[in-house]
Image: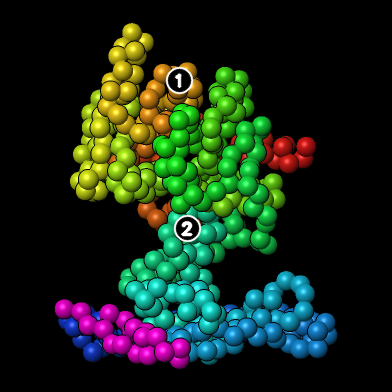
Amino acid sequence: MRTKIDIPGPLGQPVYRHWWGSQLTPLARLLTVVLPRLFDWLFSLLLIGLLAPLLIVRGFISQWQSGQVFTRTSLLGRYQTPFQKLAFAGKGKGRRLAVLFNILRGDMAFAGPRPLSKEEAAQVPVDALVRFSIRPGLTSPHQLQQRVAIAHEAESVTDKEFVYSETLKGDAGLIARSAISNILGGGAPKPSPPTLKFFGISMINTTMDEAINWIVTQTRCAEKSHLAFVNPDCLNIAYTHTEYSDVLRKATRVLPDGIGIHVGCRMLGVSLRANVNGTDLFPRLCEKVVEQNLSLFLLGAKPGIADAVAANMQKRYSGLQIVGTQHGYFSPDEEASIIQKINASGANILLVAFGAPKQDIWINSHLADLKPAVSMGVGGLFDFYSGQISRAPLWMREIGMEWIWRLIQEPGRLWRRYVIGNPLFLFRVWKQGRQ
Protein backbone atom coordinates (compact mmCIF):
# COMPACT_ATOMS: atom_id res chain seq x y z
CA MET A 1 0.00 0.00 0.00
CA ARG A 2 1.26 3.49 -0.87
CA THR A 3 0.24 6.73 0.80
CA LYS A 4 0.65 10.41 0.05
CA ILE A 5 0.61 13.60 2.07
CA ASP A 6 -1.08 16.68 0.60
CA ILE A 7 0.69 19.96 1.31
CA PRO A 8 -0.66 23.29 0.03
CA GLY A 9 1.91 25.38 -1.82
CA PRO A 10 2.33 29.16 -1.61
CA LEU A 11 0.10 29.54 -4.68
CA GLY A 12 -2.75 27.65 -3.03
CA GLN A 13 -2.32 24.49 -5.11
CA PRO A 14 -1.84 21.11 -3.46
CA VAL A 15 1.74 19.88 -3.58
CA TYR A 16 2.51 16.23 -2.93
CA ARG A 17 5.31 14.70 -0.97
CA HIS A 18 6.93 11.42 -2.07
CA TRP A 19 4.82 8.29 -2.40
CA TRP A 20 6.28 6.21 0.41
CA GLY A 21 5.82 2.49 0.63
CA SER A 22 4.38 1.57 4.03
CA GLN A 23 6.76 -1.42 4.11
CA LEU A 24 9.80 0.89 4.43
CA THR A 25 11.47 0.96 7.82
CA PRO A 26 11.90 4.36 9.52
CA LEU A 27 15.65 4.13 8.85
CA ALA A 28 15.14 3.37 5.15
CA ARG A 29 12.64 6.20 4.89
CA LEU A 30 15.10 8.59 6.54
CA LEU A 31 17.94 7.54 4.25
CA THR A 32 15.72 8.04 1.21
CA VAL A 33 15.32 11.68 2.23
CA VAL A 34 18.76 12.38 3.67
CA LEU A 35 21.15 10.73 1.23
CA PRO A 36 20.24 12.76 -1.88
CA ARG A 37 20.48 16.01 0.09
CA LEU A 38 23.77 14.94 1.69
CA PHE A 39 25.16 14.12 -1.76
CA ASP A 40 24.14 17.54 -3.13
CA TRP A 41 25.59 19.34 -0.11
CA LEU A 42 28.95 17.52 -0.17
CA PHE A 43 29.35 17.64 -3.96
CA SER A 44 28.51 21.36 -4.20
CA LEU A 45 30.85 22.12 -1.29
CA LEU A 46 33.62 20.16 -3.00
CA LEU A 47 33.12 21.98 -6.30
CA ILE A 48 33.02 25.38 -4.62
CA GLY A 49 36.28 24.54 -2.87
CA LEU A 50 37.97 23.34 -6.04
CA LEU A 51 36.69 26.24 -8.12
CA ALA A 52 37.17 28.91 -5.44
CA PRO A 53 39.87 30.89 -7.35
CA LEU A 54 37.72 30.90 -10.50
CA LEU A 55 34.59 31.89 -8.57
CA ILE A 56 36.42 34.78 -6.87
CA VAL A 57 37.83 36.06 -10.16
CA ARG A 58 34.39 35.72 -11.82
CA GLY A 59 32.85 37.69 -8.95
CA PHE A 60 35.36 40.52 -9.34
CA ILE A 61 34.72 40.63 -13.11
CA SER A 62 30.95 40.80 -12.52
CA GLN A 63 31.35 43.61 -9.99
CA TRP A 64 33.63 45.53 -12.35
CA GLN A 65 31.38 45.08 -15.40
CA SER A 66 27.95 45.65 -13.88
CA GLY A 67 28.39 46.94 -10.36
CA GLN A 68 27.03 43.76 -8.75
CA VAL A 69 28.30 40.23 -8.24
CA PHE A 70 25.06 38.30 -8.84
CA THR A 71 21.85 38.58 -10.80
CA ARG A 72 18.81 36.96 -9.19
CA THR A 73 15.85 35.25 -10.87
CA SER A 74 12.70 34.57 -8.83
CA LEU A 75 11.66 30.92 -9.18
CA LEU A 76 9.76 28.30 -7.22
CA GLY A 77 11.49 25.46 -5.44
CA ARG A 78 10.37 22.52 -3.31
CA TYR A 79 6.71 22.76 -2.24
CA GLN A 80 6.55 25.86 -4.51
CA THR A 81 8.64 27.85 -2.02
CA PRO A 82 10.06 30.97 -3.76
CA PHE A 83 13.84 31.33 -4.03
CA GLN A 84 16.33 33.50 -5.91
CA LYS A 85 18.38 31.60 -8.48
CA LEU A 86 21.86 33.10 -8.70
CA ALA A 87 24.03 33.81 -11.72
CA PHE A 88 27.15 35.91 -11.99
CA ALA A 89 26.38 39.37 -13.37
CA GLY A 90 28.18 40.69 -16.41
CA LYS A 91 29.13 39.10 -19.70
CA GLY A 92 31.43 36.16 -20.28
CA LYS A 93 31.64 32.47 -19.48
CA GLY A 94 30.98 30.85 -16.13
CA ARG A 95 27.87 32.84 -15.24
CA ARG A 96 25.95 29.70 -14.28
CA LEU A 97 28.57 28.55 -11.76
CA ALA A 98 26.88 30.73 -9.14
CA VAL A 99 24.07 28.16 -8.98
CA LEU A 100 26.42 26.03 -6.85
CA PHE A 101 25.54 28.33 -3.95
CA ASN A 102 21.83 27.61 -4.50
CA ILE A 103 22.55 23.88 -4.33
CA LEU A 104 24.72 24.27 -1.22
CA ARG A 105 22.01 26.07 0.72
CA GLY A 106 19.24 23.72 -0.43
CA ASP A 107 17.30 25.82 -2.93
CA MET A 108 18.14 23.34 -5.69
CA ALA A 109 19.65 19.93 -6.31
CA PHE A 110 22.02 18.71 -9.00
CA ALA A 111 19.26 16.51 -10.45
CA GLY A 112 15.56 17.27 -10.44
CA PRO A 113 12.73 18.91 -12.41
CA ARG A 114 13.51 22.29 -13.96
CA PRO A 115 12.84 25.23 -11.59
CA LEU A 116 9.77 27.14 -12.77
CA SER A 117 8.57 30.70 -12.59
CA LYS A 118 5.29 31.44 -10.83
CA GLU A 119 3.57 31.76 -14.22
CA GLU A 120 4.97 28.43 -15.47
CA ALA A 121 3.98 26.68 -12.23
CA ALA A 122 0.38 27.81 -12.69
CA GLN A 123 0.28 25.87 -15.98
CA VAL A 124 1.46 22.54 -14.53
CA PRO A 125 -1.30 19.88 -14.79
CA VAL A 126 -2.78 18.81 -11.47
CA ASP A 127 -1.59 15.21 -11.90
CA ALA A 128 2.00 16.47 -12.31
CA LEU A 129 2.15 18.69 -9.21
CA VAL A 130 4.15 15.93 -7.53
CA ARG A 131 7.17 17.50 -9.29
CA PHE A 132 7.17 20.09 -6.49
CA SER A 133 7.71 17.43 -3.81
CA ILE A 134 11.46 17.45 -4.50
CA ARG A 135 14.02 20.20 -5.06
CA PRO A 136 14.34 21.52 -8.62
CA GLY A 137 17.49 20.45 -10.40
CA LEU A 138 20.41 21.94 -12.24
CA THR A 139 19.67 19.29 -14.82
CA SER A 140 16.45 17.37 -15.45
CA PRO A 141 15.61 14.33 -17.60
CA HIS A 142 13.56 16.50 -19.94
CA GLN A 143 16.39 19.01 -20.41
CA LEU A 144 18.80 16.15 -21.06
CA GLN A 145 16.51 14.65 -23.69
CA GLN A 146 15.99 18.07 -25.27
CA ARG A 147 19.74 18.42 -25.64
CA VAL A 148 19.88 15.37 -27.92
CA ALA A 149 16.47 16.09 -29.55
CA ILE A 150 14.56 13.08 -28.14
CA ALA A 151 12.24 14.92 -25.72
CA HIS A 152 9.07 13.57 -27.34
CA GLU A 153 6.97 13.54 -24.14
CA ALA A 154 5.63 16.62 -22.37
CA GLU A 155 7.92 17.99 -19.66
CA SER A 156 5.24 17.40 -17.01
CA VAL A 157 5.10 13.68 -17.91
CA THR A 158 8.89 13.28 -17.73
CA ASP A 159 9.06 15.18 -14.43
CA LYS A 160 6.39 12.99 -12.85
CA GLU A 161 8.14 9.80 -13.91
CA PHE A 162 11.41 11.12 -12.47
CA VAL A 163 9.88 11.89 -9.08
CA TYR A 164 8.26 8.47 -8.74
CA SER A 165 11.48 6.64 -9.64
CA GLU A 166 14.10 8.91 -8.04
CA THR A 167 17.06 7.27 -6.30
CA LEU A 168 20.53 8.48 -5.39
CA LYS A 169 21.97 6.15 -8.02
CA GLY A 170 19.52 7.51 -10.59
CA ASP A 171 20.47 11.10 -9.72
CA ALA A 172 24.16 10.32 -10.13
CA GLY A 173 23.48 8.67 -13.49
CA LEU A 174 21.47 11.66 -14.70
CA ILE A 175 24.29 14.04 -13.72
CA ALA A 176 26.85 11.88 -15.53
CA ARG A 177 24.72 11.58 -18.67
CA SER A 178 24.10 15.31 -18.66
CA ALA A 179 27.83 16.00 -18.53
CA ILE A 180 28.44 13.64 -21.47
CA SER A 181 25.57 15.02 -23.54
CA ASN A 182 26.96 18.55 -23.21
CA ILE A 183 29.66 17.47 -25.65
CA LEU A 184 26.97 16.74 -28.28
CA GLY A 185 24.38 19.37 -27.53
CA GLY A 186 26.00 21.94 -25.29
CA GLY A 187 26.88 25.49 -26.08
CA ALA A 188 24.80 28.51 -26.87
CA PRO A 189 21.33 28.04 -28.41
CA LYS A 190 21.38 27.93 -32.20
CA PRO A 191 18.69 28.97 -34.70
CA SER A 192 16.16 26.33 -35.64
CA PRO A 193 15.21 26.87 -39.31
CA PRO A 194 12.05 25.23 -40.71
CA THR A 195 14.11 23.31 -43.27
CA LEU A 196 17.45 21.53 -42.94
CA LYS A 197 19.63 20.69 -45.93
CA PHE A 198 22.38 18.09 -46.17
CA PHE A 199 24.08 17.33 -49.50
CA GLY A 200 21.17 18.87 -51.42
CA ILE A 201 18.49 16.86 -49.54
CA SER A 202 15.93 19.04 -47.75
CA MET A 203 14.35 17.85 -44.49
CA ILE A 204 11.51 19.33 -42.47
CA ASN A 205 12.75 20.50 -39.06
CA THR A 206 9.73 19.63 -36.98
CA THR A 207 8.48 17.94 -33.81
CA MET A 208 7.18 14.44 -33.28
CA ASP A 209 3.61 15.62 -32.61
CA GLU A 210 3.55 17.81 -35.71
CA ALA A 211 4.89 14.98 -37.87
CA ILE A 212 2.15 12.60 -36.68
CA ASN A 213 -0.55 15.23 -37.18
CA TRP A 214 0.77 15.80 -40.71
CA ILE A 215 0.44 12.09 -41.51
CA VAL A 216 -3.15 12.05 -40.25
CA THR A 217 -3.99 15.18 -42.24
CA GLN A 218 -2.52 13.66 -45.42
CA THR A 219 -4.81 10.63 -45.12
CA ARG A 220 -7.69 12.97 -45.92
CA CYS A 221 -6.04 14.40 -49.05
CA ALA A 222 -6.73 13.17 -52.54
CA GLU A 223 -3.06 13.44 -53.51
CA LYS A 224 -0.81 10.53 -52.46
CA SER A 225 2.08 11.29 -50.10
CA HIS A 226 5.53 9.74 -49.80
CA LEU A 227 7.16 10.18 -46.39
CA ALA A 228 10.86 9.35 -46.06
CA PHE A 229 13.12 9.21 -43.01
CA VAL A 230 16.85 9.82 -43.50
CA ASN A 231 19.73 9.14 -41.15
CA PRO A 232 23.47 9.63 -41.80
CA ASP A 233 23.69 6.28 -43.55
CA CYS A 234 20.85 7.26 -45.91
CA LEU A 235 22.57 10.56 -46.67
CA ASN A 236 25.87 8.78 -47.31
CA ILE A 237 24.09 6.52 -49.83
CA ALA A 238 22.34 9.48 -51.47
CA TYR A 239 25.69 11.29 -51.76
CA THR A 240 26.75 8.87 -54.54
CA HIS A 241 23.46 7.15 -55.49
CA THR A 242 21.85 9.49 -58.01
CA GLU A 243 18.51 7.66 -58.27
CA TYR A 244 18.04 7.59 -54.49
CA SER A 245 19.00 11.24 -54.19
CA ASP A 246 16.44 12.16 -56.85
CA VAL A 247 13.74 10.11 -55.09
CA LEU A 248 14.38 11.90 -51.78
CA ARG A 249 14.12 15.26 -53.54
CA LYS A 250 10.76 14.21 -55.01
CA ALA A 251 9.33 12.84 -51.73
CA THR A 252 6.41 14.77 -50.25
CA ARG A 253 8.25 15.13 -46.96
CA VAL A 254 11.63 14.00 -45.59
CA LEU A 255 12.23 13.79 -41.83
CA PRO A 256 15.55 13.75 -39.90
CA ASP A 257 16.37 10.50 -38.11
CA GLY A 258 19.29 9.86 -35.78
CA ILE A 259 21.77 11.50 -33.45
CA GLY A 260 24.16 11.99 -36.38
CA ILE A 261 21.76 14.50 -37.93
CA HIS A 262 21.68 16.35 -34.61
CA VAL A 263 25.49 16.54 -34.50
CA GLY A 264 25.59 17.59 -38.16
CA CYS A 265 23.16 20.41 -37.46
CA ARG A 266 25.37 21.68 -34.64
CA MET A 267 28.34 21.64 -37.02
CA LEU A 268 26.36 23.78 -39.49
CA GLY A 269 25.34 26.26 -36.78
CA VAL A 270 21.67 25.28 -36.55
CA SER A 271 19.62 23.14 -34.16
CA LEU A 272 17.44 20.09 -34.73
CA ARG A 273 13.99 20.51 -33.17
CA ALA A 274 13.48 16.77 -32.70
CA ASN A 275 14.95 13.45 -33.76
CA VAL A 276 11.80 12.33 -35.58
CA ASN A 277 12.83 8.72 -36.12
CA GLY A 278 10.40 6.05 -37.23
CA THR A 279 11.06 3.81 -34.22
CA ASP A 280 9.85 6.44 -31.75
CA LEU A 281 7.11 7.64 -34.10
CA PHE A 282 5.47 4.25 -34.71
CA PRO A 283 3.78 3.66 -31.30
CA ARG A 284 2.58 7.26 -31.20
CA LEU A 285 1.22 6.86 -34.73
CA CYS A 286 -0.61 3.66 -33.70
CA GLU A 287 -2.25 5.54 -30.84
CA LYS A 288 -3.35 8.29 -33.24
CA VAL A 289 -4.57 5.76 -35.80
CA VAL A 290 -6.88 4.24 -33.18
CA GLU A 291 -8.13 7.68 -32.17
CA GLN A 292 -8.84 8.71 -35.77
CA ASN A 293 -10.25 5.31 -36.88
CA LEU A 294 -7.56 4.85 -39.54
CA SER A 295 -5.81 1.67 -40.67
CA LEU A 296 -2.31 0.41 -41.48
CA PHE A 297 -0.72 -2.09 -43.86
CA LEU A 298 2.72 -3.52 -43.00
CA LEU A 299 4.95 -4.47 -45.92
CA GLY A 300 8.49 -5.80 -45.60
CA ALA A 301 11.04 -7.70 -43.47
CA LYS A 302 11.44 -11.47 -43.31
CA PRO A 303 8.45 -13.84 -43.37
CA GLY A 304 6.54 -13.73 -40.09
CA ILE A 305 8.05 -10.48 -38.83
CA ALA A 306 5.26 -8.16 -40.01
CA ASP A 307 2.69 -10.59 -38.58
CA ALA A 308 4.46 -10.47 -35.20
CA VAL A 309 4.48 -6.65 -35.28
CA ALA A 310 0.75 -6.61 -36.00
CA ALA A 311 0.01 -9.01 -33.13
CA ASN A 312 2.17 -7.11 -30.65
CA MET A 313 0.82 -3.67 -31.49
CA GLN A 314 -2.83 -4.78 -31.58
CA LYS A 315 -2.36 -6.25 -28.12
CA ARG A 316 -0.83 -2.97 -26.97
CA TYR A 317 -3.41 -0.67 -28.62
CA SER A 318 -6.95 -1.95 -28.39
CA GLY A 319 -8.88 -1.26 -31.58
CA LEU A 320 -5.76 -0.79 -33.76
CA GLN A 321 -6.64 -1.69 -37.35
CA ILE A 322 -3.74 -3.39 -39.13
CA VAL A 323 -5.66 -4.57 -42.17
CA GLY A 324 -2.88 -6.48 -43.88
CA THR A 325 0.71 -7.70 -43.73
CA GLN A 326 3.16 -8.95 -46.32
CA HIS A 327 6.81 -9.96 -46.02
CA GLY A 328 9.36 -8.31 -48.27
CA TYR A 329 10.80 -11.43 -49.88
CA PHE A 330 8.81 -11.54 -53.10
CA SER A 331 9.80 -11.72 -56.75
CA PRO A 332 9.12 -9.03 -59.38
CA ASP A 333 6.45 -11.30 -60.85
CA GLU A 334 4.51 -11.14 -57.56
CA GLU A 335 4.66 -7.37 -57.32
CA ALA A 336 1.38 -6.64 -59.11
CA SER A 337 -0.59 -9.06 -56.92
CA ILE A 338 0.94 -7.59 -53.74
CA ILE A 339 -0.01 -4.06 -54.79
CA GLN A 340 -3.53 -5.36 -55.45
CA LYS A 341 -3.56 -6.93 -51.96
CA ILE A 342 -2.51 -3.61 -50.40
CA ASN A 343 -5.17 -1.69 -52.30
CA ALA A 344 -7.91 -4.23 -51.51
CA SER A 345 -7.15 -3.91 -47.78
CA GLY A 346 -8.43 -0.32 -47.67
CA ALA A 347 -5.43 0.79 -45.61
CA ASN A 348 -4.94 4.54 -45.14
CA ILE A 349 -1.21 4.28 -44.36
CA LEU A 350 1.37 1.89 -45.82
CA LEU A 351 4.59 1.17 -43.94
CA VAL A 352 7.36 -0.23 -46.14
CA ALA A 353 10.34 -1.91 -44.46
CA PHE A 354 12.77 -2.79 -47.24
CA GLY A 355 15.71 -0.75 -45.95
CA ALA A 356 17.39 2.19 -47.69
CA PRO A 357 17.50 2.96 -50.54
CA LYS A 358 15.20 0.18 -51.81
CA GLN A 359 12.08 1.14 -49.81
CA ASP A 360 11.90 4.77 -50.99
CA ILE A 361 12.77 3.89 -54.58
CA TRP A 362 9.99 1.26 -54.52
CA ILE A 363 7.46 3.72 -53.06
CA ASN A 364 8.36 6.36 -55.65
CA SER A 365 7.98 3.84 -58.48
CA HIS A 366 4.56 2.60 -57.36
CA LEU A 367 3.03 5.62 -55.63
CA ALA A 368 0.58 6.24 -58.47
CA ASP A 369 -0.65 2.62 -58.31
CA LEU A 370 -1.01 2.47 -54.53
CA LYS A 371 -4.31 3.44 -52.87
CA PRO A 372 -3.09 4.24 -49.32
CA ALA A 373 -2.95 8.00 -48.89
CA VAL A 374 0.46 7.90 -47.18
CA SER A 375 3.32 5.52 -47.93
CA MET A 376 6.38 5.68 -45.68
CA GLY A 377 9.71 3.88 -45.62
CA VAL A 378 10.50 2.66 -42.10
CA GLY A 379 13.79 0.75 -42.39
CA GLY A 380 14.35 -1.82 -39.62
CA LEU A 381 11.37 -0.71 -37.53
CA PHE A 382 9.58 -4.07 -37.83
CA ASP A 383 12.52 -5.90 -36.26
CA PHE A 384 12.18 -3.80 -33.10
CA TYR A 385 8.43 -4.15 -32.68
CA SER A 386 8.36 -7.85 -33.54
CA GLY A 387 10.76 -8.48 -30.66
CA GLN A 388 13.57 -9.73 -32.92
CA ILE A 389 15.92 -6.90 -31.90
CA SER A 390 15.88 -5.00 -28.61
CA ARG A 391 15.96 -1.21 -28.47
CA ALA A 392 18.87 0.53 -26.78
CA PRO A 393 18.11 1.53 -23.16
CA LEU A 394 17.02 5.13 -22.66
CA TRP A 395 20.26 6.12 -20.92
CA MET A 396 22.24 5.21 -24.05
CA ARG A 397 19.88 7.22 -26.25
CA GLU A 398 20.21 10.19 -23.89
CA ILE A 399 23.95 10.37 -24.53
CA GLY A 400 23.61 9.75 -28.26
CA MET A 401 25.08 6.24 -28.19
CA GLU A 402 22.22 4.13 -29.54
CA TRP A 403 24.39 3.31 -32.57
CA ILE A 404 26.87 1.49 -30.32
CA TRP A 405 24.03 -0.74 -29.06
CA ARG A 406 23.05 -1.54 -32.64
CA LEU A 407 26.66 -2.23 -33.60
CA ILE A 408 27.05 -4.67 -30.69
CA GLN A 409 23.88 -6.49 -31.76
CA GLU A 410 24.79 -6.84 -35.45
CA PRO A 411 28.52 -6.15 -35.88
CA GLY A 412 28.87 -8.09 -39.12
CA ARG A 413 26.12 -6.18 -40.89
CA LEU A 414 26.52 -2.73 -39.35
CA TRP A 415 30.23 -2.17 -38.73
CA ARG A 416 30.75 -0.44 -42.08
CA ARG A 417 27.70 1.83 -41.56
CA TYR A 418 28.90 3.09 -38.18
CA VAL A 419 32.68 2.68 -38.01
CA ILE A 420 33.28 4.06 -41.50
CA GLY A 421 29.97 5.74 -42.31
CA ASN A 422 29.64 8.00 -39.26
CA PRO A 423 33.06 9.69 -39.63
CA LEU A 424 32.50 9.94 -43.39
CA PHE A 425 29.16 11.68 -42.85
CA LEU A 426 30.66 14.19 -40.41
CA PHE A 427 33.55 14.86 -42.82
CA ARG A 428 31.08 15.57 -45.62
CA VAL A 429 29.09 17.87 -43.33
CA TRP A 430 32.31 19.69 -42.46
CA LYS A 431 33.00 20.14 -46.19
CA GLN A 432 29.44 21.44 -46.72
CA GLY A 433 29.91 23.92 -43.90
CA ARG A 434 33.12 25.26 -45.44
CA GLN A 435 31.38 25.74 -48.77
- Tell me where residue 322 sits by quadrant: top left
Find residue 361 and report its horizontal and vertical position in percent. 49, 22
Which residue does the image show at 31% across and 24% down from the upper left? 342
Which residue does the image show at 30% across and 29% down from the upper left? 346
Q: Amino acid at mark 2?
A: Ala
Label 2: state its secondary structure: loop
* Quadrant where the C terminus is found in the figure: top right
- Quickly name the residue at label 2: 151
Q: Is residue 140 above or below residue 195?
A: below
Left or right: 241, with 387 as reference point:
right
State which region is magenta: 1-19
* Magenta-span inclusion, residue 2: yes
- Quickly name the residue at label 1: 368
Q: Is residue 242 above or below residue 380?
A: above
Find residue 24 and report its horizontal and vertical position in percent. 21, 82
Query: How far apart are the two marked residues, 2 and 1, measured between alpha carbons?
Result: 36 Å
- Tell me where residue 261 sits by quadrant: top right
Q: Amino acid at mark 1?
A: Ala
Graded by Cα atoms within 10 Å as few (under 14), some (14 to 19) or many (20 or more), the crowding at tag 1 reads: few
